[in-house]
Image: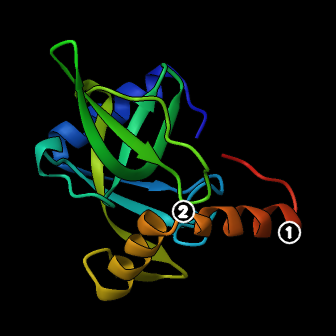
Amino acid sequence: MQVNQVTVDLVRRVVKKKGSILLPAHGKSMFPFIRQGDICHFDACDPKTYKRGDIVLFTVGSNRLIAHRFMKKIHKDNQTYYLFKGDTNLLFDEPITQEQILGKMTAIERKNKKVNLENVWSNIWSLLIINLPMMSKLLRKFIYRKGDFQY
């Protein structure tokens, strides 16, 4: 989601002070798990506790908020980096640092129905996306066929 630095700072302050934030979904990089207009619940969380497949909100540059799946962490030059990937993206996002992480997604609201991400179906979907890279290609083809594609 394209935003400005003021918005990024505001999101960071709200998560730090309140422990959570609700944000509308924008884009198709997590389709169909997260859809345009869904309300995403993010909670403050220590990155050391992330499990592969968790959906995490982070910043890129000063004007982008992104929620993608945590894939792995790497250590390079005495620094820890985190790698994420959108469900319909073919490649990892650029590595980010802990300072760029804002929170972990815990629930989605769609059509006035709240779905907790600690359920069986969410876990099955996460395992499929992580372990079957072909799924991302198929989803991407489906989205392109349906119209414009936004990361």
Q: Is residue 95 left or right of residue 110?
A: left
Q: Secondary structure at mark 1?
A: helix
Q: Nearer the viewer, residue 74 or 60?
A: 74
Is residue 79 at least partly visible in the picture? yes
Other residues around mark 1 within 10 Å, as few (<14) / some (14–19) / many (≥20): few
Question: Which residue is outermost to the top?
Answer: 77
Q: Nearer the viewer, residue 137 or 117?
A: 137
Q: Is residue 146 left or right of residue 129?
A: right
Is residue 31 at least partly visible in the picture? no
The N terminus - image quarter:
top right
Residue that appears at 78% across and 52% down = 149
Percent position of residue 88, x then y:
62, 58
Residue that appears at 37% across and 78% down = 122
Residue that appears at 48% across and 48% down = 85
Percent position of residue 99, x then y:
25, 25
Hey, which quadrant is residue 137 in on the image?
A: bottom right
Question: Mark 2 sits on what residue?
Answer: 133
Q: How many marks?
A: 2
Percent position of residue 57, x then y:
37, 45
Q: How far apart are the two marked residues, 2 and 1, measured between alpha carbons?
A: 21 Å
Q: Nearer the viewer, residue 43 or 129?
A: 129
Give above or below for 111 relative to 138: below
Q: Secondary structure at mark 2?
A: loop
Percent position of residue 131, x then y:
42, 67
Give above or below for 143 relative to 115: above
- Which amino acid type corresponds to the residue marked 1 in the rendered image? Lys
Numbered disc in front, either 2 or 1:
2
Question: Mark 1 sits on what residue?
Answer: 146
Hey, which quadrant is residue 4 in on the image?
A: top right
Labels 2 and 1 touching (C-beta < 8 A):
no
